[in-house]
Amino acid sequence: MLRAQARELTRAEILSKQTQQLIENMREAMRDAPGVGLAAPQIGVSLQLAVIEDREEYHVKATPEQLAERGRRPVAFHALINPKIVATANPGVEYFEGCLSVTGFVAVVPRHRRVTVEFLNERAEPVRVEAEGWYARILQHEIDHLYGKLYIDRMHMRTFCTVENFEQHWKSMPTAKVVAKLG
């Protein structure tokens, strides 16, 4: 399921009790993990649906410098349905990334610093978001899931490591320095 393209939802499907319950279940699963995003294919449902939330409490382990480098700020909970990236800017911004589907590992992944995404929300209303920094990274990561891609398909292979290894050796180092060392 993780490698297949998920199908789009109709307006009627989005508004159905079943989809509304799925969104709530995904919110709970994402928070329980904890994670900042979860796509339906990650829980065995092949639909173009993802949920995102980057809570302030998730930022406490990062230094102010790390938060600034990544452009990381809290993002309120929201659902993305049938999302499309319609514009990108600043390719090649590299940071460590992990995934709830590849638990216990991280790697440096290049992404765009800015993206514009169009999607439907949980009320089937059209939304256009211009995101940058970490929020843009989360959007790209979750949208990749809806098209059968994982971060390991985009990562710098030599940076793939366990979370424990990352915490011990690389966490406090700027990502560019890590990439230069492991090049």
Image (tube, rainbow, N blue to C red):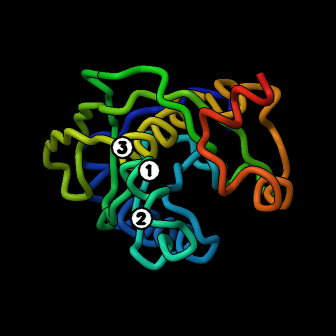
As measured in the structure, the alpha-carbon distance from the residue carrying label 3 to the one carrying label 2 is 12 Å
Q: Residues within 10 Å of mark 2 (few under 14, many from 20)?
A: many
**Residue 86 screen position, x and y as percent:** 25, 22
Task: Please give the residue where the numbered disc 3 appears in the rendered image.
Answer: 133
In the rendered structure, find residue 50 and report the number of the disc placed on it.
1
Q: Amino acid at mark 2?
A: Asp
Q: Amino acid at mark 1?
A: Ala
Q: Nearer the viewer, residue 49 or 135?
A: 135
Q: Residues within 10 Å of mark 1 (few under 14, many from 20)?
A: many
Of helix, strand and loop, which one carries label 3? helix
Question: Do labels 1 and 2 touch, CB within 8 Å?
Answer: no
Which image quarter is the N terminus in? top right
Q: Quadrant of residue 113?
A: top left
As measured in the structure, the alpha-carbon distance from the residue carrying label 1 to the one carrying label 2 is 13 Å
Q: Which of the two marks, 1 or 2, is nearer to us in this view? A: 2
Of helix, strand and loop, which one carries label 2? strand
Q: Is residue 147 left or right of residue 156?
A: left
Question: Do labels 3 and 2 touch, CB within 8 Å?
Answer: no
In the rendered structure, find residue 14 and report the number of the disc placed on it.
none
Of helix, strand and loop, which one carries label 1? strand
Write the residue at 78% across / 34% down: 159
Which image quarter is the C terminus in? top right
Q: Is residue 51 left or right of residue 141?
A: left
Task: Please give the residue where the numbered disc 2 appears in the rendered image.
Answer: 54
Q: Residues within 10 Å of mark 3 (few under 14, many from 20)?
A: many
**Residue 150 screen position, x and y as percent:** 65, 34
Q: Quadrant of residue 179?
A: top right
Q: Is residue 65 left or right of residue 120?
A: right
Q: Amino acid at mark 3?
A: Gly
